[in-house]
Amino acid sequence: MKYWIIIDSVQKGPLSVEELYAIPGLSMSTPVWHEGLADWTTAAAIPEIAAVIASRQNGFSNQQPYGQNYGAAPQQPYGTPYGNQYSQPYGGAYRQPAYGQPQYSLEPFDPERMPPMPDNYLVWAIIATICCCIPAGIPAIIYASKVSPAYMRGDYNGALDASSKAQMWIIVAFVAGLIWAPFSMLLGLL
Amino acid sequence: MTKPPVYIPPEPPAGPQPTAKARVTRRMILTAVILIAATGALILYASVDPSTNLYPRCSFRMLTGLSCPGCGSQRALHALLNGDPAAALRFNAILAIEIPLIVLLIVSRLAGNRAPRLRKFLSARAFILLLLSTIIIWTVVRNILEI
């Protein structure tokens, strides 16, 4: 069987399974067509090509720049850990219905599809402690420390939550400082 | 041999999305405001000595009589801007860690994905908790030694 694929908007084909094996950009979301299909589908929906991608990440993960992104992913059920919240905006575009196969089970866990890490506002937290608003600066630093570990776990919502709490404490620190400043200047004049 | 059909890319996710232009403009305004305020503050701190009554005082020190980790920063900044780093260090020694760290965090932020290891290091839980404990230990030490 010969396959046609589209990588970076460029159509390639006909290609054999062996030739597909040598194409570095091939991933589970790559559009694929072969004779007998009414329309294009994704690589994940064609078992032979999904097997190529899966076998390649086991054997060639050092040479393949994309290999690491899918480490042990195809076995993982779609929907964990951030799939529930982000399957719509980030994954929706790639999931086309493909002749009744349980495609979701092959959907890769793709860190590139995860939104960038939320800011931990550490600079502002440090400035808040320097500017004498320490009671509010300390929780800001503690929440700043929670952003990256949550993100690394794949818990995007947890990272976002820690980020917004750090931001809130920084705002508290600066508002308190701005309210305090004129009073302290007046007291200093007495 | 049959030809593949024309590929119709899937629809992009619907919903209002801010354009790149609008986002950049708002960020630029915010950046400009912060830069102008910082420049103004630097000129003020360079020219007027914070030991006079004109500057805000530390709430923590006025309420408790103890020095907070930031006490002395205003005088230290004035000394530093007038080319006396030794005096700056005497007013608040932890600035020797915090000022380079702030510069490093800003550099890391501007570098974005070009310096992923620096960014990972600076946002690591262990690093931030080390920073926090350093600040707390500094506060205790400076109140015991009265520096």
Image (cartoon, coloured by chain):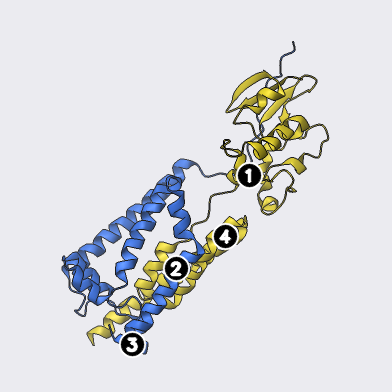
Chain colours: A yellow, B blue
Find disc 2 in the rendering and name its residue: A170
On the image, the x and y values in percent for residue A118 come to: 52, 56
Disc 1 and disc 2: Cα gap in Å? 33 Å
- Residue B15 visible in the snapshot: no
Give the labeled residue for mark 3: B144
| Among numbered discs 4 and 1, the one appearing first in the sequence | 1
Q: Nearer the viewer, mark 4 or mark 1?
A: 1
The front one of A22 and A105 is A22
Q: Residue at x 34, y 66 (%)?
A: B98
The type of residue carrying mark 4 is Ala
Q: Are marks 3 and 2 on the same chain?
A: no
Q: Is B90 left, or right, of B137 in this rendering?
A: left
What's the CA distance linking mark 3 and mark 4? 38 Å
Q: Nearer the viewer, mark 3 or mark 2?
A: 3
Mark 1 highlights which residue?
A110
Report the chain holding disc 2: A
**Quick one: quadrant of the N terminus of chain B?**
top right
Q: Amino acid at mark 3?
A: Ile
Circles 3, 4 touching at the beta carbon (< 8 Å): no
What's the CA distance linking mark 1 and mark 3?
A: 52 Å
The chain containing the residue under callout 4 comes to A
